[in-house]
Image: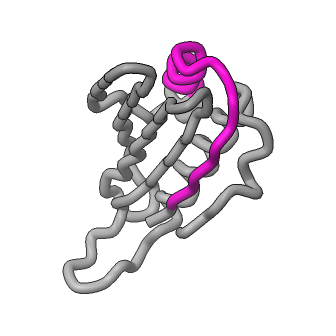
């Protein structure tokens, strides 16, 4: 699993719309699996899920993009997982890392600022 989080200021609607386009444009084999939006008061949440094949293991890799807006700040979490066909342990996380790299580059193009220095737990 690859995970990265980042907080920044920006346009919620513009960011999530641009991210969607950039992720699909950045990886020719990526597809949009689904999403959900929620709003209550000044708090808004958008979740987007994408997938693509992992070239090494021929399994699917999933990328979840979560964007939260609260108190005038945007909080982005991206998690890439999958790509391993092993039953008891992980054998391939290269597909996850590659998909995350595309997502980080997309977030930077969308105005999140320098994200490579964000928390990375993967």
| Magenta-span inclusion, residue 41 | no
Q: Residue at x 60, y 27 (%)?
A: 72
The extreme left residue here reads 87
Frontmost residue, 100 versus 27: 100
Which coloring applies here? one colour
Horizontal arrangement in the rendering, residue 17 relative to residue 89 (left or right): right
User: Where residue 106 sits in the image (x, y, percent)?
Assistant: 64, 33
Quarter-of-image position of residue 47: top left
Left/right placement of residue 46 relative to residue 99 reads left
Determine if residue 25 is in view.
Answer: no
> At 64% from the left edge and 43% from the top edge, which residue is drawn?
7
Which portion, as a residue range, is magenta? 3-22
Count of numbered tags: 0
Q: Residue furthest bottom?
A: 88
Residue 5 vs 103, above or below: the answer is: below
- Residue placed at 68% from the left, 37% from the top? 8
Q: Position of residue 53 (x, y in %)?
A: 38, 47
Task: Determine if the magenta segment contains residue 8.
Answer: yes
The quadrant of the image that shows the N terminus is bottom left
Front residue of 24 and 39 = 39
């Amino acid at each position: 699993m690859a995970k990265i989080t980042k907080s920044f200021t920006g346009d919620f609607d513009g960011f999530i719309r641009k991210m969607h386009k950039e992720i699909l444009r950045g990886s020719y084999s990526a597809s949009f699996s689904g999403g959900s939006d929620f709003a209550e008061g000044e708090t808004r949440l958008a979740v987007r899920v994408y997938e693509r094949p992992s070239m090494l293991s021929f399994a699917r890799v999933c990328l979840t993009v979560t964007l939260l807006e609260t108190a005038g700040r945007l909080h982005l979490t991206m998690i890439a997982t999958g790509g391993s066909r092993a039953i008891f342990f992980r054998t391939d996380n290269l597909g996850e890392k590659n998909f995350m790299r595309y997502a980080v580059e997309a977030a930077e193009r969308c105005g999140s600022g320098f994200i490579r220095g964000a928390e990375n737990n993967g």
